[in-house]
Image (cartoon, grey):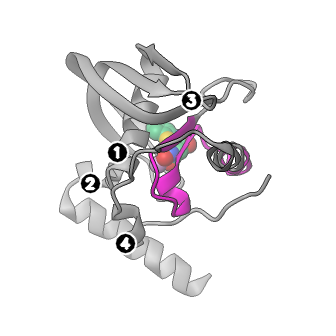
Amino acid sequence: MAILDILEFPDPQLRTIAKPVKNVDASIKQLVDDMIETMYDAEGIGLAATQINVHKQVIVIDVSEERDQALVFINPNIEVVDAELHEYQEGCLSVPGYYEEVSRPVGVKVNALDQNGDAFEMQPEGLLAVCIQHEIDHLNGKLFVDYLSALKRNRIKQKLQKERRTA
Ligand code: GNR
Ligand code: NI
């Protein structure tokens, strides 16, 4: 297992579109294990492969209190089943230290493969529904700051760049 480096906004690699996984083989299982370890180390509730500069459609999520219920989504497909929007204060390991309200559809249905390559479907609710949409955005090169005004987004970008210069 390995803890991987997480890219930070505005790294242009975060804009890369992830490709579908063709075979859930040993190398994908290794990637999933490393992503789960990296997510727990960073104290995040989710991680998309894009964030560790691997441009494959792989997501890990754990919204459990005990941090012992990791979910794996390979090649996820999402469908909105309830378009009513709910606001949630989102954060992102690629935008460390910033939290802003984002509106997303409250009901979604997700089809994906698990770490064994088996297909499954779920209708997540609450935080899990928010998180899966946030992670699928990463696979499409999108960040939660893209939902904010350009003014807010640029402020966050400049503060992060300044922090990094003086770190
Ligand atoms: O750890 C995370 N918390 C979080 C809180 C609200 C909405 C989404 C998230 S996902 C984030 C981890 C992350 O950056 N995943 O891409
Ligand atoms: Ni994120």
Name the residue that disc number 4 marks. 12
Local crowd size for mark 2, using a 10 Å CA cut-off: few (<14), some (14–19), many (≥20): few
Kindly identify the amino acid type of the residue bearing the numbered disc 2. Asp
Residue 134 falls in which quadrant of the image?
top left
**Count of labels in the image:** 4
Q: Is residue 19 above or below residue 136?
A: below
Residue 3 in picture, x, y percent from top left: 73, 58
- The CB of the residue at mark 1 lies under 8 Å from ligand 2: yes
Residue at 20%, 56% in the rendered image: 149
Kindly identify the amino acid type of the residue bearing the numbered disc 3. Gly
Residue 121 among those drawn in magenta:
no
Name the residue that disc number 1 marks. 137
Q: Which residues are magenta?
A: 37-60
Name the residue that disc number 2 marks. 146
Residue 136 in picture, x, y percent from top left: 38, 40
Name the residue that disc number 3 marks. 117
